[in-house]
Amino acid sequence: VQETFGQTQGTMLSILLIFAGLIALGSVLNAALVSLSEREREVGTFRVLGYWPKEIGRIFRGEQFLLIGVGTILGLVAGYGLSHGLAIAYDTELYRFPVQIKPIRLAETVLLMTLFGMIAQWFILGAIRRLDWMEAQKIRE
């Protein structure tokens, strides 16, 4: 019973991790694209002034990784608290789920969020390169 339960739990955990990764990537990418669309005129102005796309991308990269850093730290703290809360809620005479979070898992989470940020940055750089400078200047606020 324990072996079957362990296999089932491992499969479900893998599926949940894949979906969580897709949601995290989508959230990071969406935030970056919204930031770009809100500042399209500013990006067009920089391009007209002679800035290269990579130079403009650095502005977005700094903002994005600051948000990812703060969000990841808050997410790790909230996840740790939630794990303890769930363990306490399901603590009965029949079941006990001890909270065991390995430091390597926390490091993997930080690395994955950094990777998602780099993927989003790649999309943003492509959008900056494709941006029509003159059309961006004509946008009225």
Image (cartoon, rainbow, N blue to C red):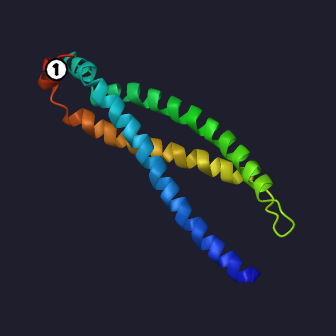
Q: Nearer the viewer, residue 79 or 93?
A: 93
Q: Which residue is label 1 attached to?
A: 139
As drawn, is 42 to the left or to the right of 108? Answer: left
Q: Quadrant of the N terminus?
A: bottom right
**At x 75% / y 49%, what residue is drawn?**
85
Near mark 1 (Cα within 10 A), the count class, few <14, some 14-19 or many ≥20, is few
**At x 55% / y 60%, what residue is drawn?**
17
Instruction: Estimate the x, y position of residue 29 in percent, counting from the top left.
Output: 39, 42
As drawn, is 123 to the left or to the right of 133? Answer: right
Residue 118 in sight:
no
Instruction: Estimate the x, y position of residue 41 in percent, counting from the top left.
Output: 23, 20
Give amino acid for label 1.
Answer: Ile
SS category of the residue bearing label 1: loop
Instruction: Estimate the x, y position of residue 21 in percent, counting from the top left.
Output: 50, 54
**At x 44% / y 41%, what residue is drawn?**
28
The image shows residue 103, relative to residue 95, as above or below, that is above
As drawn, is 123 to the left or to the right of 76? Answer: left
Residue 1 in sight:
yes
